[in-house]
Image (cartoon, helix red, strand yellow):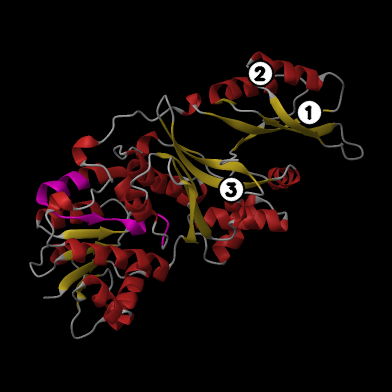
Amino acid sequence: MKPMNVGLLGLGTVGGGTLTVLRRNAAEITRRAGREIRVTMAAVRDLDKAKHYASAGLVLTDNPFAVVDNPDIDIVVEMMGGISPAKELILRAIENGKHVVTANKALIANHGTEIFAAAQKKGVMVAFEAAVGGGIPIIKAIREGLTANRIEWIAGIINGTTNFILTEMRDKGAGFDEMLKEAQRLGYAEADPTFDVEGVDAAHKLTIMSAIAFGIPMQFDRAYIEGITKLTGDDVKYAEQLGYRIKLLGITKRTAKGIELRVHPALIPARRLIANVDGAMNAILVKGDAVGATMYYGAGAGAEPTASSVVADLVDVTRMHTADPHNRVPHLAFQPDALSDEPILPMDEVRTAYYLRLRALDKPGVLADVTRILADLDISIDAMMQKEPHEGEEQVDIIMLTHQSMEKNINAAMAKIEALPAICGKIARIRVEQLGK
């Protein structure tokens, strides 16, 4: 059979890794795909920097539209990142009848619904395994491996930068700012780490998984997003003393009122397997009604781990290239005309448990005032720890774990407690997730 000709948009970290894996494992990949997968063209920003990739069969260009408009290209692989011009290029490739493979999580989370509709109309495939979890095949697991299940919830450590920072804060007893600088020095964090540390990157990935798990359109704009920048070394230390570890989690859950879609730091019991995922690694828990909880662990970023997912998508597209479009696996697991209109639940309506840390004057009656406010808002205390003041200090840290409560009640309680004369400053609040028993 004639080879499948591939055009790359971008030859950076992931693009270069993809080319390396395809060349190194060419014989094995051909045996699996049923025909040769051959990269014949690549668009790059700087032709001089990319010239070492050039070979007899690879044409380099600095015009990405030359790739998507080339009639000899069967599959376009987009690894440029960002929204524009990636969106325009992908839609042009689809209009030209080409299949698309992309690692662009931001684009899929924001515009996936539009892109999939265009692909459906033209009878081509858009594959995006590499957009979530790097080398972890989580999209295929949810969309195909767990297709017999009604997915109940997904909870994941899906950003390696923040997981590295939180691991270092725990191991070294340091603060966020210090460990961010260390992450940047080691190359785990970008010079501008905002998307990572503020939870935006994780929210992109969670939006994609939620859409596949529950058969809903992409709704990134409705995700609740909270990063790790306000966490302190004290919170990490106190969590450990209470038997918990703090991780930045992406959580999506089906409830009677709607779909939860939220990214935020969370205390997880230290005995949970996912609580022991350290460094820059990723892990994703998926709970299905038939299979129970399953966990997927691995490298969430990097040249060859992400290339592993890109090449797997290339093999899938190659296998299904001649199949009737109606017999292919739908982009969002469910048939396009069977997507659900279940609403995304506002964060105020979410129920979970909470860790509260307040600093108060060390005098009688303070705890009584605090617990009365919590009780009035139907918030019960699960555990409490009061630290002894240091010599000469008049303020103490009080740490509480609550039972499950409504977010809006917790917010109201915090406002009332912070207004008490004996309370010094803002209350630290972190959600607590048991993730099963």
Q: Is residue 133 magenta?
A: yes
- Of the image marks 3 and 1, the number of the one nearer the N terminus: 3
- Quarter residue 244 falls in: top right
Secondary structure category for the residue under label 1: strand
Assess disc 1: are there few (<14), some (14-19) or many (≥20) residues with their C-alpha within 10 Å of its C-alpha. Answer: many
Residue 40 point in image, percent of width and height: 18, 75
CA separation in Å, label 2 and label 1: 14 Å
Disc 2 target residue: 416
Disc 1 target residue: 360
Region of the chain picked out in magenta, as a range: 115-134
Residue 327 point in image, percent of width and height: 16, 51
* Residue name at image x 76 percent, y 45 percent: 241
* Residue name at image x 44 percent, y 27 percent: 346
Q: Quadrant of the N terminus?
A: bottom left
Assess disc 2: are there few (<14), some (14-19) or many (≥20) residues with their C-alpha within 10 Å of its C-alpha. Answer: few
Q: In the rendered structure, which amino acid carries the disc numbered 1?
A: Ala
8 vs 106, left or right, is left
* Residue name at image x 68 percent, y 23 percent: 380
Disc 3 target residue: 247
Q: Nearer the viewer, mark 2 or mark 3?
A: 3
Is mark 2 in CB contact (under 8 Å) with mark 3? no
- Of the image marks 2 and 1, the number of the one nearer the N terminus: 1
